[in-house]
Amino acid sequence: MTKRYLTALAGLALLAACQSTGGLGTSDRRTPPGVNARGDSEDGLIVGHRLMESGEYELALKAYMRAAGEVGINADVLSAIGSANLRLGRLGQAETILRRATREDPTFVPALNNLGVVLMEQGKPAEARLIFQQAYALDSGQTDSIRENLRLAIAQSESNVYTEPQEEPNFSLVRRGQGQFVLLSQL
């Protein structure tokens, strides 16, 4: 009788272990307590924008990458990734990604504006001016920051054009033998 009793008791214990009780043992180890692992997550772009506002650019970049995995690669996601790279000082990466965003959607004003900012940071005011002009036209001049960026790009590109020319080096042509000439300069 004790053998049957022990077998029945072991069977009941196995059945009890298989049932979900909602207690501590049922949560996923990766999920913090109080978080519904099966619930909807916040949009990666929204999280990234909030992190950018708080100055957490590296975390924002990770959130934007997660958004790219969730919604795919589009101009909005690429623009967000590019602006995070811009804030992190990765100008080459930012330029590449923002140019791709403008190829995806040539009318996406934030990508154009951010590309213009990258170009200004790289010392390319003439190209930045063209990009800002496109953004300003598409935006119908409604955004103050784009208008200010365009004004700065115009001022900087015109100051480069109208600067005093540097002193030209003094070249002289010297004959060396039959039909040979050498160009000399005084540096």
Image (spheres, grey):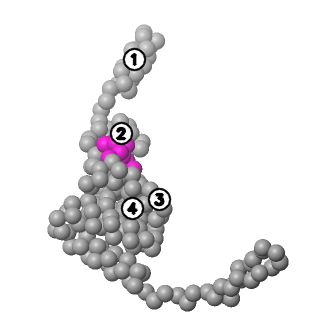
Q: Closer to the N terminus: mark 4 or mark 1?
A: 1
Do residues under tags 1 and 2 come within 8 Å of each other at their CB atoms? no
Q: Main secondary structure of the magenta part?
A: helix
Marks 2/4: CA distance? 35 Å
Dot label at residue 11: 1
- Amino acid of disc 3: Gln
Numbered label attached to residue 162: none
Q: Tell me residue 167's x, y (percent).
A: 55, 90
Q: Please, what is the three-letter code of the amino acid marked with disc 2?
A: Ser
67 in magenta: yes
Location of mark 4 (residue): 84
Give x and y (percent) for residue 137.
21, 64
Element at label 2: loop
Q: CA distance from mark 1 to mark 3?
A: 62 Å
| Of callouts 2 and 4, the N-terminal one | 2
From what the image shows, is residue 65 above or below residue 179? above
Q: Quadrant location of the N terminus?
A: top left
Q: In the depicted view, which residue is nearer to us: 35 or 182?
A: 182
- Please give the name of the residue rendered at 33% of the width and 70% of the height, measured from the top-left corner: 129
- Mark 2 or mark 4: which is in front? 4
Q: Is residue 117 magenta?
A: no
| Residue carrying label 2 | 27
Q: Which residues are magenta?
A: 65-74
Q: Are marks 1 and 3 in contact (CB under 8 Å)?
A: no
- Looking at the picture, which amino acid does disc 4 mark? Ala
Q: Is residue 181 above or below residue 4?
A: below
In the image, which is nearer the foreground, mark 2 or mark 3?
3
Q: Which is more N-terminal, label 3 or label 1?
A: 1
